[in-house]
């Protein structure tokens, strides 16, 4: 019996090796990405959510949990900034704006109507500095959202209210000298929304829908009727698959972004945020070979106000979009309530990317 044991061990080893080889040959589908997401959901306190996976702009996987149904329109929070960034790029390509255009010119008619800023340095802030969050706003104590509670007690959140929110900014002094420091803020992208309206002669929502979103296949995109006030920095909603189609704008040679504007976006010069990452047209960028890269952004909106003019206002959700350029894969996620305790952003971001890299059959 002792002499037979090595034979048994060898046989078992052989069977394990055969099984492993067969597993390696078994095509791995986008279901792997859904499984990674569901494992993360299972460890978290998220009651509802949705996930979509697109490859080459084509939907290859969709999953939902809880109250969110397949294809439902969901709010996007700061994923809206990418839409604003690409709309600005479109206006630059058409010669209606320029990266180095100062606010004194880009918002000339608006400033004539609202008055000059308390801090004259704001007049010299450029479109470029707004796009990359280097306009001098504080960021952490956001100049836009701080007065929002008092305003919504007497006014609706269902209007964009660009002029009102711009007045909040114009009465404040900049925290940093423009161009000197990265400080992520909603304020910068609020100003860009107003610039889009002035440069295009259109309302922000209508211009971005017609010039960018509809051509990319985001047919159900709209500003959230209950939160239009968040507009260009956090107000869009649509099915996640529509956002995944929009995110294809960042693919090399996609005509949604012109060649010169794309070259600017991909260059890290003056845009660095640390760790080999920079901020471009409303999204974080880590360039890769071949003119593509990894693009991503997080969004979140948590708000509760009982005595609002519209009635009780409540929101708590997080969103995430990532483009894995070398794979030509876009993944978009929505969960509620918003991320708090439990699995971190980094954990789910890595899990989704690792799962996507393991897929061998994208049919």
Image (tube, rainbow, N blue to C red):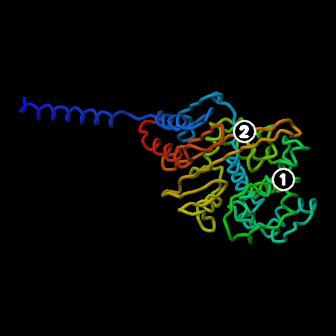
- Indicate the quadrant where residue 314 lies: top right
Which SS class for mark 1?
A: loop
> Closer to the N terminus: mark 2 or mark 1?
1
Residue that badge 1 annotates: 147
Q: Position of residue 235 (x, y in %)?
A: 75, 44
User: Is residue 214 depicted above or below 93 in this figure?
Assistant: above
Residue that badge 2 annotates: 221
Q: Residues within 10 Å of mark 2 (few under 14, many from 20)?
A: many
- Residue for point 16% across, 34% down: 9
- Residue for point 55% across, 39% down: 54
- Residue for point 60% across, 55% down: 284
- Indicate the quadrant where residue 17 lies: top left
In this picture, residue 86 sits left or right of residue 359 = right
Q: Quadrant of the N terminus?
A: top left
Q: Position of residue 162 (x, y in %)?
A: 85, 51
In this picture, residue 130 sits left or right of residue 154 = left
In this picture, residue 64 sits left or right of residue 81 = left
Residue 272, disc? none
Which SS class for mark 2?
A: loop
Considering depth in this image, is 343 or 254 the residue closer to the camera? Answer: 343
Considering depth in this image, is 146 or 18 the residue closer to the camera? Answer: 146
How many numbered dots are placed on residues in this image? 2
Q: Position of residue 10 (x, y in %)?
A: 15, 35
In this picture, residue 24 sits left or right of residue 70 = left
Q: Position of residue 153 (x, y in %)?
A: 88, 44
């Amino acid at each position: 019996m002792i002499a037979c044991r090595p034979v048994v061990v060898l046989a078992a080893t052989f069977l394990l090796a055969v099984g492993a080889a067969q597993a390696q040959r078994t095509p791995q589908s986008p279901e792997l990405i859904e499984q990674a997401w569901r494992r993360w959901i299972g460890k978290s306190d998220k009651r509802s959510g949705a996930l979509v996976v697109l490859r080459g702009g084509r939907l290859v996987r969709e999953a939902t949990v809880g109250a969110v149904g397949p294809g439902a329109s969901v709010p996007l929070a700061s994923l809206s900034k990418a839409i604003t960034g690409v709309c600005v790029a479109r206006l630059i390509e058409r010669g209606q704006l320029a990266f180095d255009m100062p606010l004194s010119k880009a918002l000339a008619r608006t400033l004539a109507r609202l008055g000059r800023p308390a801090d004259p340095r704001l007049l010299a802030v450029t479109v470029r500095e707004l796009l990359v969050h280097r306009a001098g706003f504080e960021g952490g104590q956001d100049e836009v959202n701080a007065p929002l509670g008092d305003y919504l007690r007497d006014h609706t959140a269902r209007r964009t209210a660009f002029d009102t929110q711009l007045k909040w900014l114009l009465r404040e002094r900049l925290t940093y000298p423009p161009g000197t420091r990265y400080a992520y803020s909603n304020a910068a992208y609020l100003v860009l929304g107003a610039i889009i309206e002035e440069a295009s002669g259109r309302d922000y929502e209508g211009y971005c829908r017609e010039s960018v979103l509809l051509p990319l296949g985001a047919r159900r995109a709209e500003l959230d009727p209950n939160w239009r006030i968040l507009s260009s920095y956090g107000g869009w909603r649509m099915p996640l698959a529509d956002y995944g189609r929009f995110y294809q704008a960042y693919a090399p040679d996609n005509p949604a972004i012109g060649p010169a504007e794309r070259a600017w976006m991909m260059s890290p010069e003056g845009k660095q945020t640390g760790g080999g990452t920079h901020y471009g047209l409303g999204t974080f960028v880590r360039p890769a070979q071949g003119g593509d890269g990894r693009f991503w952004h997080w969004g979140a909106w948590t708000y509760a106000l009982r005595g609002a003019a519209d009635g009780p206002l409540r929101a708590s959700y997080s969103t995430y979009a990532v483009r894995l350029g070398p794979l030509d894969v876009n993944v978009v996620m929505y969960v509620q309530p918003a991320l708090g305790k439990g699995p971190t952003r980094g954990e789910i971001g890595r899990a989704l990317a690792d799962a996507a890299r393991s897929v061998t059959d994208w049919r």
